[in-house]
Each structure stands twice: as C-alpha cells, then as structure tokens.
Amino acid sequence: MISKEERTKRLSAIINSLHDLYPGKEHKLLIDKLDFLFTNFNLKLFKKGLHNGEIPQPHTGMTPSLLEDTHYFITCGSGGRALSILKNHKDKIVQTINPNDDVKRGLTFGIYKEMVKNREFNVGVFTTGMGPSSVEIVMGMDFLAVAPDNITVIRVGTAGTMQPHIRAGYITIITSAIRDESVTDKYVDNDYVPFASPEIIVALKTASHNAKFNNIEIGPKITKDSLQWEFGNTPLREKSKEASDIAIKGGVVSSSMESSVIYTLCDLYQNNLIYPSKGIKKKARAGTIVAIINDPPNIDEEVHFMSDNDKIVKAEKTAIRIAEKAIKILYMYDNDLMDKVTHDRFSSEVVEFKKQNEEKKTHLLTIQRQMRSTYRN
C-alpha cells in the first residue's frame, strides 16, 4: 500500500501534465475523480462509480458524460499526431485529457468544436497506441465502454506500400482490412473480413478531390501484428515472402497495424455484440486514411524507408486535412445540410461502394485465408 503522500505526489504530476497540454481546458470531472481515487481509494465505491460513468476509464480518462455530445472522432497511433491535430484547432479546443503522469507513455485525448453551415458540433481526437493489441485495449476496453450509440471513427496514420506503383509520399484510403493479426481471432471467426463504412470512404474520396492531391490510391490493406516477420527478419522469412506475394498479387495497396481491429470492434459494437444496449439501435462507422512512408522493395528485396522525407511529411499533413474535411462532409450528410444534387450523388456513391464490397468479399476472403495459412501450418 503506497502512502497518502505518494498518492498526492502522483496526482499532482497528473494534474500538472493536464495544465501543460492546454492550460485551463483540463477535464474538471477527471481531476475530481482522480483526487477521490488517489486519496480515498475504496474498491467497492470505485467499481460502482465506474459502472455509473463517474470514474474515468483507466487508460484514457474517458467517461460517458465526457463523450455524450461527441459523435465524430479522429484516431491515430501516435500521440504526437493527435496533438498536432488538436493544435490545428487550438482556438476551438473544449476539452483535453492526458491521464498518465508519464506523458511519453500517455494516451492523448481531446475535443474541439467544428463549424459547418452555421452549425457547431464536437470532434474527438484520441490515440490508440501502435499495434492491434494496443487498439484493443484503448478502443475495446475504454472508448467503446463509454461511447455514444452513434459514432464515426476515422483513423489517420502511416503505412507501408504493397504495390510497385505506390511510393513514399502517396496516400491510401482503406476500403477493407485483411486480418493478418491474431487479436480479432478472439472476437470473430476465421472467415470474417472487416470493411470500412462506405459513407466514410465516399467522404474521404470527396475530401481528397478537394485537397487536389494526386497520388491517392483506394483499396484493401493488411493489418499485421509483427513488423519483423513482414520484413523477413525472422527465421520464417520464406513464409513471409510467400504471404507478401499473395497480398501483392491480390491487389492489396498497403500494410499497417491497426485498421482491422478498429473496423471489427466498431462492427461488433454496432451490432450489439460488445457493450450491448438493450432496445437501442446503434450506428458505428469506421474508415482509414494513411500516408505511405516507404518505397517498394528493390530487386534485392530491400525496403527503403524515408526515401523522401519532405514528400512523406506533406502526405501526412494532407491525410490529416482530408480526414478533417471528411468529418465535416459526413456531418452535413447526416444532418441533411447538403443540397439535393450533392446529397443524391453522395448517396449513389455509397450504394455503389456497398455493392463493390459484396463483389470483392470472396476475393478478399481468399487472400486472407491464403496469407494466414502461410504461417499457421
């Protein structure tokens, strides 16, 4: 049992980190409840408070009351990227949280106000950490435990190319996420293929046209859980090469470590298979836009990262702007703020993407089965 003095010291460090991020914007409820948690801890009361939404979630500090007016979210693996997004809107910040006293390990969360057609709404920004297991902890244990019944989540980040024509500095919009990781195996069966929301894909596609960024590809990606294995840096390098060849020939555009878990968890949440709400119809949409940070392997199979850092930085910043614009487009679509022609065109594209998803499902499932069989036999 740590002393009350030590608890107070830790609490002070946490509160100071909140002040350092955005002075005067820290979550008052969080500070009050942390004070209760650290100085007067009682497990029974803590569990009751957690159940009632009065105690912040352990990894992010989120509570139901904090998120009740926020339905649109941008998420990323990097805390630095999340902070840069929040700083883009520094004059419109209404909330920030960093619940850990070690900021380097902490998960950043904030909310800013967005305005469209004279209507104001909240946009949340949070980090999941890197890799499928971290996403499951942050989204599966914290975010979805307290999220509203209607959520839209767009992941912004970086990825590696899987195609010869897609190079460092490109952007890819992800339509589906082939499950080359094992976290989702604990939630769904082997033949489940997670898809992005068609509405988000159309919004990202529309926003990318407005951004006038030419090097954008739309297509499926793989979500892996081992970077070393993918690079052929383990004793199973031959199997790694076989799996990569399957993905490349199958038309997979990029590879990263988070989207399949985000898509799967949101799908299960929407269908009341995790954190069910009795009698309430949920809506949970997810999508991904990522900047490519490497050139395709050369003839010696050597992967070149950061070949042109200026192009990569430009692509990352553009991907963020596209995601922010897509959020505004989705808000207008959801709230009937588009003119009829634009709304009808948007709806038509959504229907078309749904149709394409169904047509591609068998092909993507085949790729998923083949890739997973290379290292599971």
Image: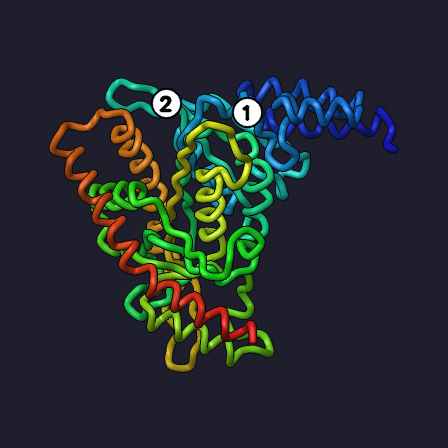
- The quarter of the rendered structure image containing the N terminus is top right
| Residue at the image point whose x is 38% and y is 40% from the top | 285
| Residue at the image point whose x is 25% and y is 41% from the top | 207
Q: Is residue 231 left or right of residue 357?
A: right
Q: Residues within 10 Å of mark 1 (few under 14, many from 20)?
A: many
Image depth: mark 2 or mark 1 in front: 1
Q: Earlier in the sequence, mark 2 or mark 1?
A: 1
Residue 107: quadrant of the picture? top right
Closest to the observer: 48 or 317?
48
Q: Secondary structure at mark 1?
A: helix
Q: Is residue 310 left or right of residue 226?
A: left
Residue 74: quadrant of the picture? top left
Residue type at mark 2? Answer: Phe
Instruction: Tell me if residue 247 comes above or below residue 99 in the rendering.
Output: below
Q: Judge whether residue 344 can be spotted in this image.
A: yes
Q: CA distance from mark 2 to mark 1?
A: 17 Å
The residue where tag 2 is placed is: 121
Residue type at mark 1? Answer: Pro
Q: Secondary structure at mark 2?
A: strand
Circle on res. 64? 1
The picture places residue 303, in percent across and down from the top left corner, at 44, 71
The picture places residue 253, in percent across and down from the top left corner, at 34, 62
Residue 327: quadrant of the picture? top left
Q: Judge whether residue 131 can be spotted in this image.
A: no
Q: Is residue 340 left or right of residue 15?
A: left
The picture places residue 83, in percent across and down from the top left corner, at 48, 37
